[in-house]
Amino acid sequence: MIAPRSQYSAELSGYLEVGGSKLVLGQLGPEYLILRDPAAVPGGRGEIVMLVDGEESRYAVLLPSDTGQTDVKIPYQRLTSDL
């Protein structure tokens, strides 16, 4: 017997912390992120913060270079060590 589908949907949100700013994520992929709103993003170290049903997870990333004011798709490399 197959269990009935739940009406539950996880509450998701996330942001990129970089250069003293918190930039809201619109989408997150394995090697890139898409910002909700265009922003200039400095290259270097940052942190992706994900909230799933109120539980926070964080991981350090390396952003390869500065982006322009209109960029929303930003490549990144996940770092294995803490900031």
Image (cartoon, grey):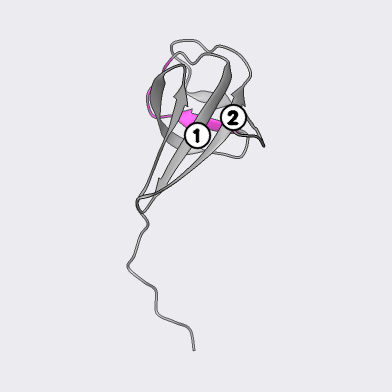
In-front residue for pair 51/39: 51
Quadrant location, the C terminus? top right
Rendered position, 81 above or below 21: below
Q: Look at the picture and state if 50 lies above or below 40.
A: below
Q: Residue at 40% across / 20% down in the picture?
A: 21
Residue 67, how many percent across, how many down? Answer: 53, 13
**Which labelled disc corresponds to residue 61?**
2
Secondary structure of the residue carrying tag 1 is strand
Tell me which amino acid carries mark 2. Val
Q: Point out residue 33 in the picture as x, y percentages from the top left corner.
A: 52, 32
Q: Which mark is residue 48?
A: 1
Tell me which segment is drawn in magenta: 32-39
Does residue 9 lie above or below 72 as drawn?
below
In which quadrant of the rendered view does residue 66 lie? top right
Task: Give the residue furthest to the left.
Answer: 7
Is residue 34 on the magenta stretch? Answer: yes
- Among the two numbered marks 1 and 2 on one chain, the one whose residue lies closer to the N terminus: 1
Say few, some or many: other residues with alpha carbon within 10 Å of mark 2 (under 14 / 14 to 19 / 20 or more): many
Q: Residue at left 61%, top 39%?
A: 30
